[in-house]
Image: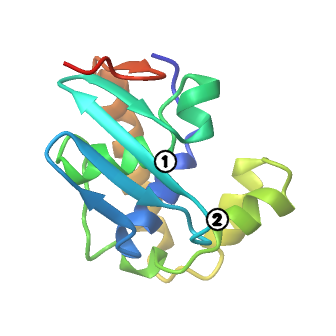
């Protein structure tokens, strides 16, 4: 599996802090930061499919997949710690920085009070992601 840009987990934290994820048994709907899009994430064990552009076109887990993995407890999450990540306009920031995710994340994090602790959690999450044996597909075969 190709690893996502390390900043993508921060977008996943915001999705969780904003309560933009609706978890179901084998799928979830994840709403974008500007509410203009809803991404469908589906899974069967360690195989994931998602309609978000990163997962679908770039073949790395986009923030909707990362958010699901966090909610499933497969990546470290401290929901209280990430609460200040609510309300970050990621779509606007990513567009303004022309998909320079590091620059967008730097701007997003500039006023976060517990920034160092959140970034440390993100590092742990990215390390944990490397150990998961995930398969990404464009579509899950329906049983």
Q: Residues within 10 Å of mark 1 (few under 14, many from 20)?
A: many
Q: Which mark is residue 121?
A: none
Picture quadrant of residue 109: bottom right
Most distant residue in the front direction: 143
Q: Quadrant of the N terminus?
A: top left
Q: Nearer the viewer, residue 93 or 20?
A: 20
Q: Residues within 10 Å of mark 2 (few under 14, many from 20)?
A: many
User: For the point 25% across and 49% down, which residue is it?
Assistant: 76
- Mark 2 and mark 1 lie on one chain; the one further toward the N terminus is 1
Which residue is disc 1 drawn over? 63
Q: Is residue 108 above or below residue 9?
A: below
Q: Quadrant of the C terminus?
A: top left
Picture quadrant of residue 74: top left
Question: Coloured how?
Answer: rainbow
User: For the point 26% across and 21% down, which residue is it?
Assistant: 142
Q: Pointer 2 and pointer 1: residues touching (CB < 8 Å)?
A: yes
Q: Nearer the viewer, residue 67 or 27?
A: 27
Q: Nearer the viewer, residue 34 or 123?
A: 34
Tell me, yes or no, if residue 6 can be seen here: yes
For numbered disc 1, what is the local secondary structure?
Answer: helix
In-image side of 78 versus 60 (left or right): left
Which residue is disc 2 drawn over? 90
Q: Nearer the viewer, residue 129 or 51?
A: 51
Percent position (x, y) of residue 134?
32, 20
Q: Is residue 7 above or below residue 116?
A: above
Q: Is residue 101 above or below residue 20?
A: above
Cα gap from disc 2 to disc 1, whole angstroms: 11 Å
User: For the point 37% across and 25% down, which residue is it?
Assistant: 130
Tell me, yes or no, if residue 82 can be seen here: no
For numbered disc 2, what is the local secondary structure?
Answer: helix
In-image side of 142 versus 36 (left or right): left
């Amino acid at each position: 599996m190709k690893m996502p840009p390390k900043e993508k987990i921060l977008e996943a934290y915001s999705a969780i802090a904003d309560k933009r994820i609706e978890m179901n048994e084998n799928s979830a709907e994840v709403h974008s930061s500007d509410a203009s899009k809803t991404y469908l994430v589906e899974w069967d064990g360690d195989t994931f499919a998602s309609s978000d552009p990163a997962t679908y076109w770039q073949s790395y887990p986009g923030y909707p997949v990362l958010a699901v993995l966090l909610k499933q407890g497969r990546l470290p999450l401290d929901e209280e710690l990430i609460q200040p990540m609510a309300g970050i306009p990621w779509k606007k920031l990513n567009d303004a920085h022309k998909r320079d995710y590091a620059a967008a994340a730097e701007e997003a994090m500039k006023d976060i009070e517990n920034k160092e602790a959140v970034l440390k959690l993100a590092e742990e999450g990215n390390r944990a992601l490397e150990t998961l044996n995930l398969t990404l597909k464009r579509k899950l075969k329906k049983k």
